[in-house]
Image (cartoon, rainbow, N blue to C red):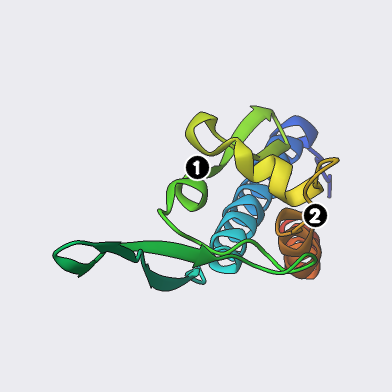
Amino acid sequence: MSVQFQWRGQKVTAEVRERIDRALRQGAAQVVRYAQDLVSRPARRVVKRRKRNTVAGKKGSTYSVYVGSSPGQPPRMRTGVGRSSIRWVKEKPLSYRVLVAAPGSYMTYLDRGTSRVQARPWLRRAVEAVQPLIDQLVRKAGG
């Protein structure tokens, strides 16, 4: 009786890499969804009235003021440009990045804060919330 072994290491390695890549892609998509949910709460709109007195009587027009988020809370949505600019891209095999595209680049400043505006973190919170799921997906894929 003879036993013959055939080495398929490269094929197995390629399959495992593909499964891990798929798991990372799913994780990146989950981070984007969670981040978009965090910044989807609408800003409160307050309608104010301008007042001026004229010879014909009181006249005025209305204008809107939006009340944003407090420092430390995710930014609130007004137009949706920032939310729709959150995306993921594949940089290289087994490497994905969640970023904010050009029209909503101000979201990065809101996330980290500036010298004049305190941080309203949303991306870090999304990554921290989804990290256990990503770990689970990668462990299952490598399994």
**Left or right placement of residue 103 versus residue 76 in this view:** left
Q: CA distance from mark 1 to mark 2?
A: 19 Å
Q: Position of residue 99 (x, y in %)?
A: 64, 39
Which residue was labeled with disc 1?
A: 85
Label 1 sits on a secondary structure element that is loop
The secondary structure type at the circle numbered 2 is loop
- Type of amino acid at the residue the image marks with label 2: Ala
The residue at 35%/64% (across/down) is 50
* As drawn, 63 above or below 21: below
**Could you tell me which residue is drawn at 45 percent across and 58 percent down?**
78
Mark 1 or mark 2, whichever is nearer to me: 2
Q: Can the viewer see residue 61? A: no
Instruction: In this rendered view, identify the residue nearer to me: 26 or 120.
Output: 120
The quarter of the displayed image where residue 89 is located: top right
Q: Which mark is residue 119?
A: 2
Q: Is residue 81 above or below residue 134?
A: above
Image location (x, y in percent) of residue 30? 60, 60
Which mark is first along the chain, 2 or 1?
Answer: 1
Nearest the viewer among 119 and 64 is 64
Please name the residue shown 59% across and 65% down the image.
Answer: 68
- The tag on residue 50 is none
Residue 118 x/y as whole percent: 81, 54
In the image: residue 57, left or right of residue 90: left
